[in-house]
Amino acid sequence: MLVGVVAVVGLVGIVVAVWPDDGVSDSEILSATLLSETRLALAVGSCNATSIDVDTVESDVEVVITLRSHDDAATEDCADGTTVTLAEPLGDRTLVDGAADRALVCEQAPGARFVECLPGPEVADR
């Protein structure tokens, strides 16, 4: 896949550089499970990922988790998992999928052991 083309015109002529897709893409959070006050297990929508980079930004009102997957066409799966440890308990802060710019709605079903979070509304003006 062609990602970019650069043309440089100089006294000698034209130089064109083409580089391929680097195989890294944003990945959405399919669900999150709060395993403890600070530990999240994430189900990730990342087809053919060999590894996942996690960027977490915490504030007093929200936790934004952005996932980037490194793709390898040799694998066939389209769901992966990773865990995240927060610096502070999630508490009442909003959990946000930075790749999808979408809040996750978290709730604990009656009798359930863990809090489950699923994609909710898009986040407006953060």
Image (cartoon, rainbow, N blue to C red):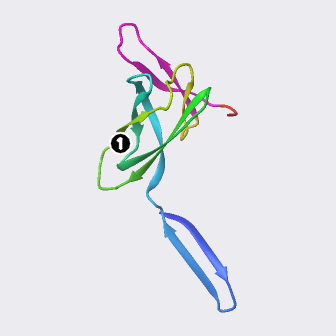
Image vertical order of residue 89 relative to residue 43, above or below: above
The x, y position of residue 26, in whole percent, is 49, 46
Position of residue 62 in the picture relative to residue 23 (left or right): right
Position of residue 111 in the picture relative to residue 2 (left or right): left
Residue type of the residue flagged with mark 1? Cys
Viewer-proximal residue among 88 and 53: 88
List the residue tagged with mark 1: 78
Quadrant hosting residue 123:
top right
Residue at position x 53%, y 41% in the image: 99
Q: Give the magenta-colored segment's residue range.
A: 102-123
The outermost residue toward the left is 75
Give the mark count. Answer: 1
The outermost residue toward the top is 110
Most frequent secondary structure within the magenta stretch: strand
The outermost residue toward the front is 87
Quadrant hosting residue 16:
bottom right
The x, y position of residue 79, in whole percent, is 35, 39
Position of residue 82 in the picture relative to residue 125 (left or right): left
Quadrant hosting residue 5:
bottom right
Residue 119 lies within the magenta run: yes
The C terminus, quarter of image: top right
Residue at position x 38%, y 24% in the image: 35
Residue at position x 46%, y 23% in the image: 117
Image vertical order of residue 82 relative to residue 22, above or below: above
Position of residue 23 in the picture relative to residue 73 (left or right): right
Decide: few, some or many residues near mark 1? Use Cα within 10 Å; few <14, some 14-19, many ≥20: few
What is the secondary structure assignment of the residue under circle 1? loop
The x, y position of residue 77, in whole percent, is 31, 44
Residue 121 lies within the magenta run: yes
Residue at position x 52%, y 20% in the image: 91
